[in-house]
Amino acid sequence: MQSVHVLSLTLLCALAASAQVISFGRCPKPAVQANFDPSKYIGRWYEIEKLPTGFQKGECGTATYSAKSAGVIGVFNSELLKDGTINSIAGSAKVKSPEEPAKLEVSFSGTPPGPYWVLSSDYEGHSLVYGCQELGIFKGELSWILSREPTISDETREELHSILTAAGVDAGKMVRTNQDRNYCSPMDQ
């Protein structure tokens, strides 16, 4: 029995190190965007809200997606840190199965791939992304609300929260990202 507790503690520490929203249980399997078209997803998205993470420490988050090859999207994420510097990372997202192109795996240099599921997107205004990984009896969840503009209507935000809630995700844990134009102006230079 003691080895089970040690294993559980080790797995919890591994999830905590990636600083996702951690809880007991299995990952939900929410429906993803029907007929998702990765080519329409290309371009710049602003982070509006997210489940807290340890790897995103700044504000003014953006994600820029580019076409790489069939089923592969280039990923370039940037954020403004408190000291005024811009933190960026490049990676790629790959469609796991042509039958479900909204289920992607994203990876960055030196990291194993993680799930990046597009639950909802109109391609021109909003996107709702969710990912969850299980480690033993724990799950680590990530989620982002993205917009083509630095703001999103409260109505759209509430609709996207409803999708998360219906999937069993605690949308109340989402935190807003500062996208104030003046504060974020260094991101445009």
Image (cartoon, rainbow, N blue to C red):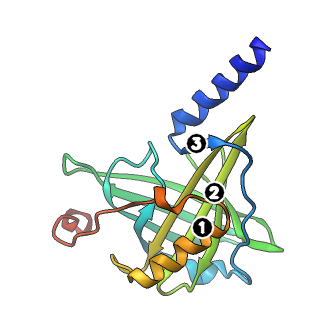
Q: Is residue 164 above or below residue 84?
A: below
Residue on which the image places disc 3: 22
* Residue 49 makes an appearance in the image: yes
On screen, residue 38 versus residue 84, left or right, reads right
How far apart in space, not on screen, are marks 3 and 1 (Cα)?
A: 16 Å
Q: Is residue 170 above or below residue 11?
A: below
- Tell me which numbered mark, 1 or 2, is placed earlier along the sequence: 2
Residue kind at label 3, given as amino acid type: Ile
Residue on which the image places disc 2: 131
Residue kind at label 2, given as amino acid type: Gly
Q: Residue at x 41, y 49 (%)?
A: 56
Residue 139 place in picture, x, y as percent: 67, 44
Choose mark 1 or mark 2, whichever is in front: 1
On screen, residue 86 versus residue 64, left or right, reads left
**Disc 1 residue crowd, few under 14, some 14–19, many 20+, Cα 10 Å:** many
Mark carried by residue 164 = 1
